[in-house]
Image (cartoon, rainbow, N blue to C red):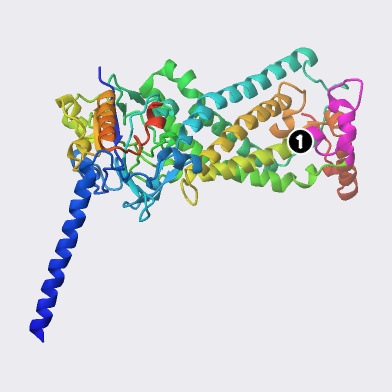
Amino acid sequence: MARMKFLCDADRCIDCNACVTACKNENEVPWGINRRRVVTLNDGLPGERSVSMACMHCTDAPCAAVCPVSCIFPTEEGVVLHSKDLCIGCGYCFYACPFGAPQYPRVGNFGSRGKMDKCTYCAGGGGTEVSGSVEEFKKYGSNRLAQGKLPLCAEMCSTKSLLAGDGDIIAQIYKERVLRRGYGSGAWGWMTAYHA
Amino acid sequence: MTRLLARTSHLLASLMFLALLGVALQTHAQRTDPNAPVEDPDAGAVKETTLLQQHPRIEGRIDIPDKRARVLEQPAGRAWVHFHEVTLRWLGSIAILGTIGILALAYWVLGRIRISAGRSGKKVKRFNPFERFSHWLTAVSFVVLALTGLNITFGKVLLLPLIGAEAFSTLSQGAKYAHNFVGFSFMAGLVLIVTLWLKDNIPKKIDLEWLKQGGGFIKSKHAPAGRFNAGEKAVFWLALGAGAAVAVSGLTLLFPFYGTNIASMHFAQIIHAIVAVLFIALIIAHIYIGTAGMEGAFEAMGTGEVDLNWAKEHHDHWLAETLAKERSSEPPAHSGVVPAK
């Protein structure tokens, strides 16, 4: 079975934020929540690079390990999903996440964050809702993976900087690119996310 | 004049075009030449490994208002998870079970510390209702905070398999809110306790003597003490220190990311958790000595009155002071010493 991953080729990312917009639209993500974001490093300086970042669907996901109610879990394809019915909004997954992926509908004073929301790899939710159902869409967003489609952010990427798919395949694509053009600043976050 | 200007500009334009063509041809030649050095556009680019070596977090600029989102990567999250899931579990288990073990051993070896002279039947007032209210406000809050706090670390191991995911989630949600709000009654209780008892808890010479005499645990010796003995003073100061630490770190966690970043949130949680489990161990010992461990001790906080002989054995200096004060200030009819019912 495929092991789903994200890879952002920072040498191609142009900070257009189309991935962010695609994600928000496809999943009808509420105001204030960004499942994906683009961070620009060394902004305006030589060597500036932008990286599109969301949940990396880590190997040994730290959020899943720390969750006090164990509501986060990896699927067979390595996609990290969670159940909003069980989430207590404690905020620990945000502290644990190396990539700042978990989001909450409210600021969170007195523990009032609400249910955690994060990138689902466009694979629906980890609750009891039927896969591809309206209920699932309302709570977690699109379930493209069940339809045999990859996350929309990567599919929409105009420079094909953001890659989604089986980890081995996208790593191979990136490797070929680096060989062909003779440079590459590496797969951002892969060491931390996949121990790669 | 205008014609001349137009001609020169035409000439300039064609010269520029030729120059550009030359440059283009040159680069084209470079690219087709396999031996030409490749200009690496990535040479000056920021690298993940370099950035992480310089700083534990990689931060950049972001277009959305959420400042926390500027942190691109913080591998420390994994280290914090290891603390919470492994280190803290061990530390908490050892501190709490270890204390219970030591107390069980103490009970087995020493047994209940009895009033050696037996009960006198006469009572002395030790704590007034306000002092008892302050104590129990803090005590009840503490127990709620301890149980709901331990649930976050140990609940999924001990309770989740027993009651199932849905019930455990509902319980934990309630526990979270209880923990967040009861924290304030604990802080209020702590402030009251400190104001009421600070002056009686200042360490004095007599405390050394109390320690030398084995703190009342050695039956043949008499350990002298004022209103609070050295052991109680230790509990007071430790509770004040630990209480302040959990209060400050707790408030930081209660208002996340107000002047704090992800690293300080980790730090606050680590301090909160370590101090809390040690505090729980301390309070377990405090509960033991106030109930099962010593005859006549619980009444002090229960009814507010202790037996005269208990006071003689554990707080002789305080008893003498109390009796002297009441004898001089009040008529004998309202004496602090009253017959037991």
Residue drawn at the location 7% of the way across and 82% of the way down: B3
Q: Callout 1, which amino acid?
A: Ala
Q: Can residue A121 be seen in this view?
A: no
Say above or below: A61 vs B248. above
Please give the chain letter of the residue carrying mark 1.
B
Considering the numbered disc 1 on the image, is that residue within a helix, a strand or a loop?
A: helix
In screen coordinates, is A170 left or right of B295? left
Say above or below: B291 vs B130. above
Q: Quadrant of residue B42?
A: top left
In screen coordinates, is B200 left or right of A20? right
Front residue of B219 and A122: A122
**What percent of the width, then of the height, locates residue B63?**
31, 52
**Does B243 lie within the magenta span?**
no
Residue drawn at the location 40% of the way across and 30% of the way down: A191
**What percent of the width, then of the height, locates residue B196?**
72, 46
Q: In which quarter of the image is the N terminus of chain B?
A: bottom left
The magenta stretch spans which residues?
B205-234
Packing grade of label 1 (10 A; few <14, some 14-19, many >=20) is some
Front residue of B73 and B142: B73
Front residue of A70 and B104: A70
Q: Residue furthest top?
A: B108
**What percent of the width, then of the height, locates residue B288?**
70, 24
Where does label 1 land, which residue? B234
Say above or below: B7 vs B136. below
Q: In which quarter of the image is residue B210?
A: top right
Front residue of B141 and A139: A139
